[in-house]
Image: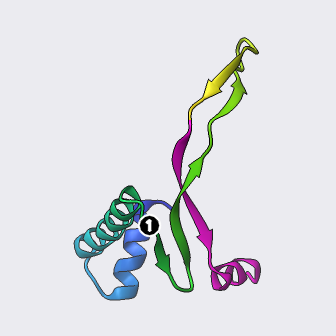
């Protein structure tokens, strides 16, 4: 499913026109992104939790040369699905 299909599905299920549904989808994605950028968790019961996970500095290898290189510590967005979502996916 891509964004266009998601917007059309939201529009049909919520009784909205496509423009309003697209605004709603953009607002949700923007709110989640902004919360993660501030370091907050976003918990949606029955769906899952979006959070920022910290990655430690580590040593890796350059795949072209095989030379060891240092990889800096960083942050990455992560999603942990709720039990209800896991059951919905596995029961299909």
- Indicate whether residue 89 is drawn in magenta: yes
Residue 46 falls left or right of residue 68: left
Where residue 18 appears, x then y in whole percent?
28, 73
- How many numbered callouts? 1
Q: Which residues are magenta?
A: 73-92
Left/right placement of residue 23 relative to residue 79 reads left
Tell me where residue 61 appears, x and y as whole percent: 72, 23
Q: Nearer the viewer, residue 71 or 45?
A: 71
**75 in relation to 38, above or below:** above
Residue holding disc 1: 5
Q: Residue at x 56, y 76 (%)?
A: 48
At a point 49% along the width and 77% down the height, the residue shown is: 43
Which colouring convention does the figure follow? rainbow
Q: Quadrant of residue 9?
A: bottom left
| Residue 21 picture location, percent across and down | 30, 75
Q: Write the residue at 36% across / 64% down.
A: 35
Q: Locate the C terminus by quadrant.
A: bottom right
Q: Name the one closer to the observer, 64 or 26.
A: 64
Q: Is residue 26 magenta?
A: no
Please tell me which residue lies in front, 82 or 2: 82
Rendered position, 9 above or below 77: below
User: Vertically, is 89 above or below 33?
Assistant: below
- Mark 1 residue crowding within 10 angstroms, few (<14) / some (14–19) / many (20+): few
Task: Tell me residue 33's x, y (percent).
Answer: 37, 60
Label 1 secondary element: helix
Q: Residue furthest top?
A: 65
- Which residue sits at x=70%, y=28%? 59
């Amino acid at each position: 499913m891509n964004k266009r299909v998601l917007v059309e599905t939201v529009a049909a299920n919520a009784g909205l026109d496509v423009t309003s549904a697209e605004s709603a989808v953009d607002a949700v994605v923007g709110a989640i992104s902004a919360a993660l950028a501030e370091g907050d968790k976003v918990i949606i019961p029955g769906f899952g939790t979006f959070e920022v996970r910290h990655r430690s500095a580590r040593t890796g290898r350059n795949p072209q040369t095989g030379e060891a290189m240092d990889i800096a510590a960083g942050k990455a967005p992560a999603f942990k699905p709720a039990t209800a979502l896991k059951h919905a996916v596995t029961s299909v």
